[in-house]
Image: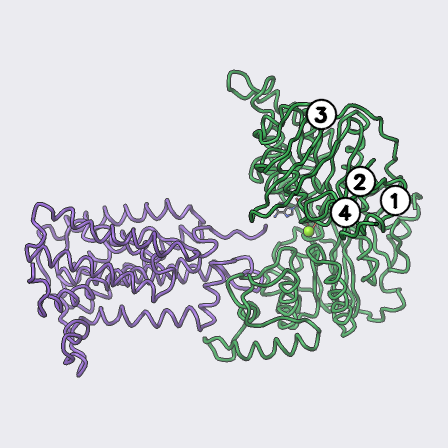
Amino acid sequence: MAHFFTYAVLTSTVAAAIALSSSFLFAALGETMGQRSGVINLGVDGIMLLSAFATYFTALKTGDLLYAVLAGAGVGLVMGFVTAFISVTLKAEQGISGIGVYLFGLGLSDLLFLRLVGTPLPISQLSPIGIPLLDRIPAVGAMFFRQTILVYLAFLLVPVFTFVLNRTTYGLKIRAAGENPSAADTVGISVARIRWSTVLIGCTMAGLAGAALLLYDGIFMENLTQSEGFIAVALVYFGAWRPLGVMGGSVLYGLAIAVVLSWKSLGIIPLSASDLAATAPAVITVLTLLLVARRFRQPAVLGKPYERGD
Amino acid sequence: MTDPGALSHLEETDPRTLSHLEEAVPLLQMSAITKRFPGVLANDGVDFDVAAGEVHALFGENGAGKSTLMRVLYGLYRPDEGKIAINGKATEISSPAAAIRQGIGMIHQHFMLVNTLTVVENIALGLKSSRGPLTDLRRVAKRVRELADSHGLKVSTDALVWQLSVGERQRVEILKALYRDANILVLDEPTAVLTPNEVDDLFRVLRQLAAAGRGLVFISHKVNEVLELSDRITVLRAGRRVGTLSREAASRESLVEMMVGHDISAEIRQAPAAGGDKRLVLAGLTVRGDRGQEAVRGVDLTVESGEIVGIAGVSGNGQRELAEAIAGIRAPEGGSALIDGKEVLGAPPDRVRAAGLAYVPEERMRDGIVPDFSVAENLMLVESGRPPFSHLGFLRARTIRRHCQKLVEEFAVKTPSLDTPARNLSGGNIQKLIMARELSGRPRVLLVAQPTRGIDVGAATYIHKRLVEQRDAGTAVLIISEDLDEVMSLSDRILVMFEGRVIGTADPRTSTREAVGLLMAGVVPS
Ligand SMILES: Nc1ncnc2c1ncn2[C@@H]1O[C@H](COP(=O)(O)OP(=O)(O)O)[C@@H](O)[C@H]1O
Ligand SMILES: [Mg+2]
């Protein structure tokens, strides 16, 4: 049992946690943008699955991981058009339509996989890039500064999104659309346009999340995400609709998974209990959610389509 | 003003002949605007114009179409017919953005502010920034402060909107319009939410804005305010323009008559109450408020059959808690409440109703109706479970419709149909709906809180008449109202509540308004 608290195991667990959290972070950051503008997208997981497959297929066929990532993001964007059309233009009930998108993604990704690939072949993975100098710092370097480009990108987007939301006119419009769309409308802002844009961003991010996840695993399989997309939605609540909070939640979640994985491989958790242990991250999140997030208020019109006139 | 000829003469008043308005081309000219909603003709060929430098009031009952006309101007609604010209140039206003570009600003009846943003952020919202994609809040704040200073509109720019009082929020709305260089400023019932002092301040600001050459549209259904502030007054009734008068030509009576379409000056008559049995007896009633404070501290009162007892008082002195405790929707601390000699205090609302109470609550939209239910469903809220409206648990649709149709006609509820959601009705018609429902059960005791608050004169007069009718039919009527005139004109006896107690009583036939007003302020004559 003492094995866990060795230098090597600790650093590799944290490094894995950071890497694992990146896909949550992409998805949850994107979802944050949508939710701040008043749109809740429950289809994230389905979009991640489709994008993961697109990433996998492209990598398999071209061998080029950049194309693979772009394919994943592109599929996310396309699904963004679908989602925005349903949620914003058609003003559908967002809870239901999101589940629809999820089931669509779940089914289609598996179908495409069986039809186009069939036997799972591994693809090459993204190799970690060390940040010069920083990666030499003892422990810290190994944990944080020898990661893949996608991990860096995910964490870089945290300050970017914070800045966009709080310091730009676009961010102001997003916040207004999620709090009082009539007020936005009466000063000449197109609520529909704002929401379309945040949904497109959110779904593209979900696409990146799928790509990141796929490239971490290096292989596609049915229901690869194991509902990570839903966890990402929960992490937005956990993070109180702020990118920094969302990042905290993602890292916590990644850490929980990494610890469970590491304890399993060290034999700390017996094989017989491993299914139970796999639920630990979800339980931790739900509990923290109950403790923390209750204190924050969600965007006032979250999930409500906007219709002009009282 | 009962001569119909007098009205038709007024309709021909040409605004351009009014001597103090010299502009030949009005700032704004709306011609023959028609706007239909499903089942409602909200504007029916309405002409309306505004000259630079004037305050033009749009006066009419709730539901007359005032807000609709201005929402058309602001690009929120597309008119079905009609033209709009700004400075003599015909324009299409297809969106609020277009309206803002044309120099139109509107302060909506329900403020259009984002509560979680600061004052500056709200004002900057939707504007081009001098820093491109980045917000330039500091610059905006500076200009807002300048504007605020020069117009006497005090606001703290960095406060979050939810922290502001209603009056402050309104100032933010005005600043928002001024910041966008609004030359035509529309204010939709701006005084409805203000205290008298705040109204004075607002009027001072509005006069100043008009004097600087802007054109102001002031929407109101309060005749005194309209006469105090406006240069011209256009009266709307049921979507039509009844006429336009200069202030000099207008009088209280003529305006009200134009608004309601008939003479309402005949005062509600005060027949002496026919003394009867004690229907409602409260003794030592004590009730706690929402924050646990003692809101009602030992109230004794009796209401006999055939009399109206009015409870006067500034709101917040325990009236709401008193009413709710009687109606069974708030747990009492102590005391007793007898209806026809039967103890009902602390009983659930259906038991209190079964004992003979009908209750018209103060918060109409929250406690009086289910806004998303239809008119018919709201009318049947109380009685739907009883014969003849249901049988073995099944509703009897035809009986119910016939009954509802009768009630709607009997109480003159203006609604496109029985299936219209109640939230679409005007405040006055919602109150009539509630009255219809409550009175259809032939109550022994009728408790009405704020019978006409926020309701236009026509509907208010109607409701007053029904209350007096109830009294004459022998019901014991208890009215709670902040409107002193209402209490004075309706009641046979007046009790004044102050800080949870009945601080004094008055006889409306012999007491003066001032005497009751002093009691309301907590001053007891020694
Ligand atoms: N968005 C809407 N949909 C349907 N009916 C409406 C709508 N807005 C207003 N109305 C109806 O149009 C009429 C005029 O309403 P409104 O212009 O709000 O009156 P006012 O402002 O004079 O009180 C009312 O009968 C109202 O019920
Ligand atoms: Mg109105």
10 Å neighbourhood of mark 1: few (<14), some, or many (≥20)? few
Q: Chain of mark 4?
A: B
Q: Nearer the viewer, residue A33 or B289?
A: B289
- Colour-to-chain, green: B
| Residue B456 circle label | none
Task: Point out residue B189 in the picture as x, y percentages from the top left corner.
Answer: 71, 56
Furthest toward the top, the residue is: B392
- Identify residue for label 1: B511
Residue type at the position of mark 4: Asp
- Colour-to-chain, purple: A
Q: Chain of mark 1?
A: B
- Identify residue for label 4: B483
Q: CA distance from mark 2 to mark 3?
A: 20 Å
Q: Chain of mark 2?
A: B
Q: Of the two numbered discs 3 and 4 on the same chain, state the one appearing first in sequence.
A: 3
* Residue beneath the point at 32% across and 45% down: A100
Task: Point out residue B344 in the picture as x, y percentages from the top left corner.
Answer: 62, 27
Q: Are marks 3 and 4 on the same chain?
A: yes
- Identify residue for label 2: B494
Residue type at the position of mark 2: Ile
Q: Are marks 3 and 1 on the same chain?
A: yes
Q: Of the two numbered discs 2 and 1 on the same chain, state the one appearing first in sequence.
A: 2
Q: How is the image coloured?
A: by chain
Residue type at the position of mark 3: Arg
Q: Of the two numbered discs 2 and 4 on the same chain, state the one appearing first in sequence.
A: 4
Q: Secondary structure at mark 3?
A: loop
